[in-house]
Amino acid sequence: MSIQPAAKLLLANVEYEITDTRRGRWRRYLYPNGRLFEEFVSHAQLFGMPVMHFTRGKCPETGKRIVAKGVIAVGRLAFGILAIGQASCGVIAIGQLSVGVLFGLGQACMGLFALGQLALATSFGVGQFAVGYAAIGQFAFGKYVLAQIGFGDHVWDMRGASQEAVKFFQTFLP
């Protein structure tokens, strides 16, 4: 049984290229196959976490992705006040799968306000499939709904318009 080169790194001492800048520290490793791992962590901190944390690729020591954690977190997996990543969680979250306390933007997202293909919001959801107190979408569910096909208390869709829904959504027009 042969050990793959990437698996060998888990047993070896990894030689990172470390670059210190005024703003933070870069840690990089170029795999023999040409793939790159890099991570940036800012020197500045807020609430005990770095102001900026960026990750890319798989860590050669563990063979796994590192979760970017910071006030601004950017990486495949991100957790922070502003989180940007394929899977992200934060006060404001942007990503393919995002969970934002205040705002979620992504293919599938959740938050107080959500904007995405699948938008699940407690307050205002906009998306192809939208759920929220107010929901706008192709298919939507909520108290006030503007949709192609909608379900809720006050619906404005292809089947008709409730006067309450019309009055509610017209308040957003100039």
Image (cartoon, rainbow, N blue to C red):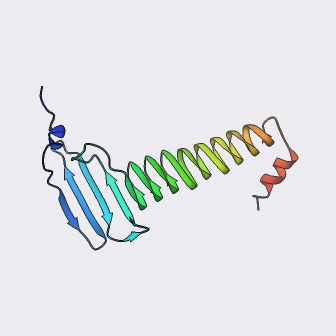
Q: Where's residue 42, x and y in %?
A: 33, 67
Q: Where's residue 148, x and y in %?
A: 72, 38
Q: Residue at x 43, y 46 (%)?
A: 86
Does residue 100 lie above or below 10 as drawn?
below
Q: Where's residue 146, x and y in %?
A: 74, 44
Q: Quadrant of the C terminus?
A: bottom right
Q: Residue at x 38, y 69 (%)?
A: 45
In terms of image quadrants, where is residue 46? bottom left
In terms of image quadrants, where is residue 7? top left
Does residue 59 lie above or below 160 as drawn?
below
Q: Residue furthest front?
A: 48
Q: Residue furthest right?
A: 163
In terms of image quadrants, where is residue 80? bottom left
Q: Residue at x 32, y 50 (%)?
A: 66
Q: Residue furthest bottom?
A: 22
Q: Nearer the viewer, residue 4 or 96?
A: 4
Q: Is residue 110 left or right of residue 97?
A: right
Q: Nearer the viewer, residue 101 or 136?
A: 101
Q: Where's residue 21, x and y in %?
A: 25, 70
Q: Residue at x 54, y 53 (%)?
A: 100
Does residue 18 lie above or below 154 as drawn?
below
